Structure formats: structure tokens, C-alpha cells
Amino acid sequence: MPSMSEIIAERTGLGDADHAWLKAVVAEWQLLADLSFSDLVLWVPDTDENVFWAVAQIRPTTGPTALIDDVIGDLIAYSPDHLVSEAYLSGEMTRTSEGKLQAGIPVDVHALPIRRGDRVIAVIEQHTSQLGVRAPSSLEQSYLKTADILARMIAEGGFPIPDEGDDALGPRVGDGFIRIDTEGTIEYASPNALSAYRRFGLIGDLEDENLAELTADLVPVTDRPVDESLRSVLSGRSARRAEAVAGDAHMLLRALPLTRGKERLGAIVLCRDVSDLRRRERELVTKNATIREIHHRVKNNLQTVAALLRMQARRIDAPAAKAALGEAMSRVESIAIVHEALSQTFDESVDFDRVVDGVLKLVGDVASPDGTAVATREGSFGVMTATMATSLSMVITELCQNAVEHGLAGQSGVVIVRPTRRPASKGVSGELQIEILDGGVGLPEGFDWRSSRSLGLSIVNTLVAELRGTLDLGSNPDGTGTRACVVVPLDQPAR
């Protein structure tokens, strides 16, 4: 199915500014669909003015759909009797009261032009189901009256009205709907709006009250600095958003002015009780802070263990024991580096480049005290989970330590760690390949790393197997030094 942008770019003569205006309309038209209980279809004119293309469609959340099928990408040819053609050419809203059948459902179809400046650039077609029509309630009457005003604002080029806010979190018609007059007095409030205000501390009814003053009065004295902002938002003179707080109650508010030409007709205010959402957010913040503190304390404890191992190594004369303690210290500190990175994030993922850089500095300092061997990274690992980061940091520590101690054999040189991410394709999951290269003496003649009794290689084999990966040791492509290659899938299961 082609996108709105693709059809407009390929099939129409609309400019970038027209395209941007239509995107703004589509971003806001759920409001019109919900208030009018209608499916909406956006039609744009082809470069051939006898053809119109359907580029966007939306269904109401407040009532049944009148369009069973998606029509995006469909076209209609010019007809003087067609509502879309008539609305486009006349610049006036066109209506039919004939309940024609669509998929066996009686439907009323209306069309309204979308005006930008002095030009009509597109048409919105409204499809309203007439199945089971009955006398509308006061809520439905208020919705429909407001929908009619919004439709006329679109036809006059006065809607949408730009404002700032998060549409994903913003209040919808069904969350709570309030209609106010030009003086800010409430003419109608939906049951959901009344429920939201009851939780906010209201005692009594909303209708005939001044919304701005009533809401500001419900805010505790300690929060008085927000009163003037609330009064300004809820006056309905401009499109604005705000959040009101009263104790543990939180409410999102969005005001949209209603106009006819230059005449103010009042405003609608949408409200949403987000108390439970804010409570969960506070719980998550507390939980995240606790987890970060745990990681911080684990890091401190591991560094203490590493310091004890270092002190013990200094008091041992046996070279083999001293080397074993040094390797154990490196393993502990490599895990500590992961926990240090996790203590600074808000989730259980970590920028692994920072971890590896810390590990490589550690390997160079410990395995080569004279500082003649350097371990460096070429490329980026990216972000990965805590479990994967811990295992891979150990793998890289062991392989780099082996490269410095055995590959370079205590001589000057560089160990290169080269990560490569392979994206998923054709059902194959993404992979991470890690090459560790040195220009040293290479592997001993007849050396079989698979049967080696080295503790370091045993640790590497075990960790790579847990990550469902593979390990290979051999010579560099140019025949010198040693190349260790680890390949692990990126979609690791949770553990």
C-alpha cells in the first residue's frame, strides 16, 4: 500500500507547504472523526484534475465504522454529481441525506474542502453509519455540534491549530470532553470529564462553572505557581496544553478554540486522568534508581575483591601463583567495568564500546607492566544487554590477555579488537563478529586449542557456548601472528 507522501509526490502537483498542511490535518483529524462518529478519507487531486486519490483514512473510536475496507491508494474519476468533485470545485461543504448502502450498511456521506490560504488543496470525505439510528443523547448532540464547527474551520483554513505537546499521550475525545463558551463557562461536560474532575477533588457539578477558575481552585496552595498558566490554558483563547496536579491526582488538559471566521465561538477542552500513569512512572524511576545503585555497589565490591587479589599477588613470590592471581584480578575487574556502565544507564542495556575500551586499557596495564603492548579497538560494538555484555567482556579479556602474554610474548606490539555487526536478513538473525588480532609469534607448532587445558580458553569456550556462538583460533590472513574470531547471534534469549 503506497504511503500518503508517495502518492502526493508521484501523482499530484501539491507543493511542500501543501503537503505539510495535509500532514498536520491528518495528525489532528482523529478529533473530527470521534466527534462526528465518522470514517474520514482524505482525497487529493491528481495532476489530471479529473482524478482524485485516497491518501489517508481513519475510523472513529466513539462509534461503529462505516467503511469496512481500506481505500488508501484508490482513485475516483471526476463526476459533477460526486461529492468530492463538488466540494473541491465549489470550495463549499457538500452533504447528502440519502443513506446509501456500503457493504449493506446505510451510510451518510459528506465532503468538506481543505483550504490553505485562498486555495482548496484536498477534500475530506465523511462516512457516517446510520445503522440503528436513534435520538441522540446530550453527549452526542454536543459532539456533533462541535464536529460541525471543526468541519467549517477546516473548510475555512482555520484548523488544525498548531500547538506543542505529545499527541501519543494527549487526551482524546473519549477521555473527557468539555465545551466552554466565550467567557470560559462550561456549557457541557461528558461523564468521563466529570469523573476525572471528581478524582481531582471536585465536589458538585461542572456545568455553569468557570472552568479556569474551578480548576485553579482545585490545585493545592503549594502548587499555586501553576495557577496563572492553568487560567490561560483553560480560557480557551488559544490552542494550549497543560498538566494540573492536586496531590496524587494528575490531569492532562488540552484546549482548542472554536471559531467562525474571526468570530470566537468558545472552545473545547479535552481532559485525561493520568494519575495511575504518573504513579507507575514514579515507581519505575524509583526502581531504576535502585537497580543503578545495586550495580554501583556490585562494581565497588568487585573492585574491592580485585584490590585484595592485587595485594595478595604482591606478597607471593611464586611466579605461577602471582600470574594466576593477576589473571583472576583482570577477570573480576572486567565484570566490574560492565556494572559501572550499567550503574549510569536507565535500563539493562549498555554502550559496549565504553566497556571494551576500559577492558583493553586494563589488559594492557596488567598483562604488559612495562607498557610496551597496546590493545586498541577498531569499529563499534553498539548497545547490548547486560547479560551479553558481561559474558563478552570476559571473552575479550581472556583473548586479549592471551594475545599480549603469548602472542606478543612480552614484546612490544599492538593487539587489535575489530567488531563487525552483520544485520539480519532472509530469516537469519543478526550476528556480531569479534576479531582479535596480534602480530606476534603465532600459535605453537601442532597446537590444538580445542583440547588445550588452559583455564582462559576453557572460560572462553564456555561463555561463547552459552551465547550460542562459535570460536576459531588461527593465523592472521597474511600468515603472521594469531587471529581469534568469535561470532555470536545478537538476539540472545533473556536469562
Image (spheres, rainbow, N blue to C red):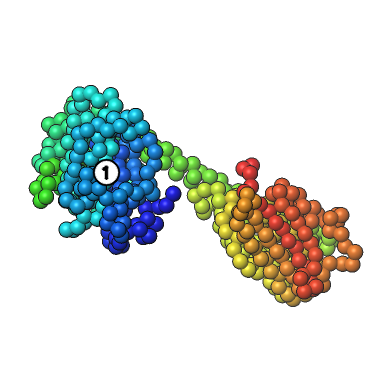
In the displayed structure image, the side of residue 128 where residue 117 appears, left or right: left
Q: Front-most of 82 and 492? A: 82
Q: Position of residue 167 (x, y in %)?
A: 33, 46
Q: Residue at x 27, y 33 (%)?
A: 100
Query: Which quadrant of the figure has residue 313?
Result: bottom right
Q: Residue at x 30, y 32 (%)?
A: 101
Q: Residue at x 71, y 52 (%)?
A: 469
Q: Position of residue 135 (x, y in %)?
A: 20, 24
Q: Residue at x 63, y 49 (%)?
A: 427
Q: Front-most of 228 and 321? A: 228
In the displayed structure image, the side of residue 210 where residue 465 appears, left or right: right
Dot 1: within a 10 Å radius of its alpha carbon, few (fewer than 14), some, or many (20 or more) residues? Answer: many
Q: Is residue 429 above or below residue 216?
A: below
SS of the residue at dot 1? Answer: strand
Asked if one can make out residue 213 in the rendered structure from this viewpoint, the answer is no
Quadrant assignment for the C terminus = top right
Question: Which residue type does callout 1 highlight?
Answer: Glu
Residue with the most extreme right position = 446
Total numbered labels: 1
Q: Front-most of 68 and 452? A: 68
Q: Is residue 258 above or below residue 8?
A: above
Query: Which quadrant of the figure has residue 176?
Result: top left
Q: Is residue 178 above or below residue 473?
A: above
Q: Position of residue 411 (x, y in %)?
A: 77, 75
Q: Which residue is mark 1?
A: 125
Q: Position of residue 289 (x, y in %)?
A: 48, 46
In the displayed structure image, the side of residue 116 where residue 60 appears, left or right: right
Asked if one can make out residue 391 in the rendered structure from this viewpoint, the answer is yes
Query: Which quadrant of the figure has residue 307?
Result: bottom right
